[in-house]
Amino acid sequence: MTTVGIICIALLAVTGTLCLVRIVRGPTTLDRTVAADVFVAATAGAIGIEAAIGRHTTTLPIIVTLSLVGFLGSVSISRFAARDDGPSERTARDRKGRS
């Protein structure tokens, strides 16, 4: 169990590092949002692996809260970005077609 836990933690550390690089270098806000969401998921996974290795359930509320905050953050940023784009070309065509 310890070897598998170490391998999983190492893979999640690589994932976290790559996500931080994407957050810093991401060309758009949505790229940074996706990277932050993956980073939150990797953090929740690392906490889950730590709980499995330590054989305790005290971190379960932390994992649930972290997942909920990550989800709500991603949804709110994507809704904000969709509002910034303005009307799409399809909407403009539909309005012209009705007139």
Image: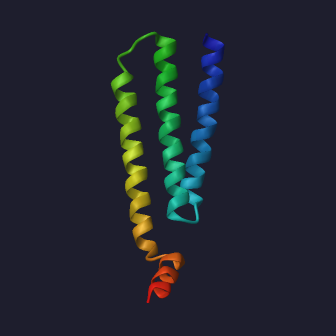
- Pinpoint residue 39: horizontal percent, then vertical percent: 52, 42
Q: How many marks?
A: 0
- Pinpoint residue 5: horizontal percent, then vertical percent: 60, 18
Which is nearer the eye, 42 or 20? 42
Residue shown at the point (37%, 30%) measured from the top left = 64
Which is nearer the eye, 70 or 23? 70
Residue shown at the point (52%, 21%) measured from the top left = 49
Side of 58 where 39 appears, left or right: right
Q: Quadrant of the C terminus?
A: bottom left
On screen, 41 above or below 6?
below
On screen, 97 above or below 47?
below
- Pinpoint residue 91: horizontal percent, then vertical percent: 48, 77
What colour scheme governs how the chains and residues are painted in the rendered image of this protein?
rainbow
On screen, 71 above or below 90?
above
Q: Quadrant of residue 31?
A: bottom right
- Please identify the residue farthest to the front as the structure is shown: 98
Q: Quadrant of the N terminus?
A: top right
Residue shown at the point (44%, 59%) measured from the top left = 78
Q: Quadrant of residue 63?
A: top left
On screen, 19 above or below 24?
above
Residue shown at the point (48%, 87%) measured from the top left = 96
- Pinpoint residue 66: horizontal percent, then vertical percent: 38, 36
